[in-house]
């Protein structure tokens, strides 16, 4: 199966997306009134109870998926959400709104915990039909490849070259890259490895003992959404019978570009996301349908 949606293309489309022409005129106008993602950024925090996820993970690890974690389930739930609510996979560039052709999730890989640690990210491409086991396999393969040859990371090499140049050259180079990206002419060799281009940035803050955080959306690139998952927290609360019981929750914070979809659509999409988190067995099989975005 190809790694792109089956979408018709025209001469005004970008390499990584198809321009949307039939959406509401108010949405088409919004990139001209809200010029940057910072102008249009909205965020919210929600939580999900983890007892079902933890039991499911224990069972799947016993079946041979020993390295499967909560983050794999989170990413699989988001990929499944995009299959049903594809407008979350839009992005704004050059004052136009596009539907992304692929599902590309940017994952920060973290560092050593020191102040000057080398912060890197990895982009993993998924299909809307991927199951949680496909997500697990693709992430592990991509991370193993990065660990085996970190020097091959193109963005790291480019950044290392740029920071060694005089400031006026660096500013000019970044301005040229912004201009090329604005028009959709930036090389795929850069956009496919860039931490600023993708369907979403998903970070596991709990792995470094932090709660979920509100991550900003960079004004450069085409990243419409960030999803930050915090550490697990314990809560004692009454159940339906009025008996107090211990439960565990994860919080997650979402920051999104409101120019791609309104709050009602986003809220509906994340109802699906929360449902899949609390019913991970639904992610073991491909979705019954994959919805296409507007023309």
Image (tube, rainbow, N blue to C red):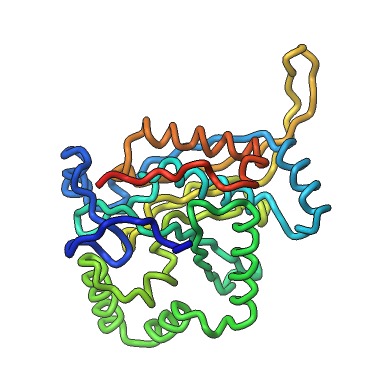
Rendering quarter of residue 30:
top left
Q: Is residue 286 among the parts visible in the rendering?
A: yes
> Residue 202 placed where, x, y %?
52, 54
Q: Give coordinates of residue 253: x percent, y percent.
A: 51, 43
Residue at far top of view: 241
- Name the residue furthest right: 62
- Residue name at image x 56 percent, y 42 percent: 252
Q: Give the x, y percent position of residue 263.
A: 36, 33
Can you see residue 114? no
- Please determine whether, in this image, residue 164 is positioned above or below residue 146: below
Residue at 28 percent across and 47 percent down: it is 39
Q: Identify whether 291 is placed above or below 126.
A: above
Find residue 17 and report its horizontal and vertical position in percent.
Answer: 30, 59
Question: Which sits in the foreground, 278 or 110?
Answer: 278
Would you identify the image quadrant in which residue 223 lies? bottom left
- How many numbered marks, from 0 up? 0
Foreground of the two, 117 or 101: 101
Above or below residue 141? Residue 247 is above
Residue at (45% x, 41% y) in the render: 84
Q: In percent of the image, x 43 and y 32: which residue is there?
A: 267
């Amino acid at each position: 199966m190809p790694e792109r949606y089956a979408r018709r293309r025209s001469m005004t489309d970008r390499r990584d997306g198809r321009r949307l022409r039939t959406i509401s005129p108010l949405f088409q106008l919004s990139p001209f009134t809200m010029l940057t993602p910072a102008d249009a950024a909205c965020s919210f925090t929600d939580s999900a109870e983890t007892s079902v996820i933890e039991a499911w993970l224990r069972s799947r690890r016993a079946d041979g998926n020993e390295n499967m974690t909560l983050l794999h389930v989170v990413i699989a739930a988001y990929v499944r959400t995009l299959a049903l609510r594809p407008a979350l996979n839009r992005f704004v560039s050059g004052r136009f709104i596009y539907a992304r052709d692929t599902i590309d999730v940017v994952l920060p890989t973290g560092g050593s915990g020191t102040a000057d640690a080398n912060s890197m990210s990895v982009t993993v491409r998924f299909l809307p039909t991927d199951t949680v086991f496909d997500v697990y396999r693709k992430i592990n393969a991509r991370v193993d490849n990065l660990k085996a040859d970190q020097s091959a990371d193109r963005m790291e090499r480019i950044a290392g070259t740029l920071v060694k140049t005089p400031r006026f050259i660096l500013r000019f180079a970044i301005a040229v890259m912004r201009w090329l990206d604005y028009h959709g002419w930036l090389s795929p060799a850069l956009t496919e490895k860039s931490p600023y281009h993708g369907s979403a940035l998903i970070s596991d803050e709990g792995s470094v003992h932090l709660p979920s955080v509100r991550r900003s959306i960079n004004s450069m690139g085409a990243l419409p959404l960030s999803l930050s998952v915090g550490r697990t927290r314990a809560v004692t609360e009454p159940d339906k019978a009025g008996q107090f019981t211990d439960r565990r929750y994860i919080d997650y914070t979402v920051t999104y570009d409101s120019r791609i979809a309104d709050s009602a659509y986003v809220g509906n999409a994340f109802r699906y996301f929360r449902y899949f988190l609390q019913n991970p067995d639904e992610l073991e099989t491909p979705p019954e349908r994959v919805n296409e975005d507007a023309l």
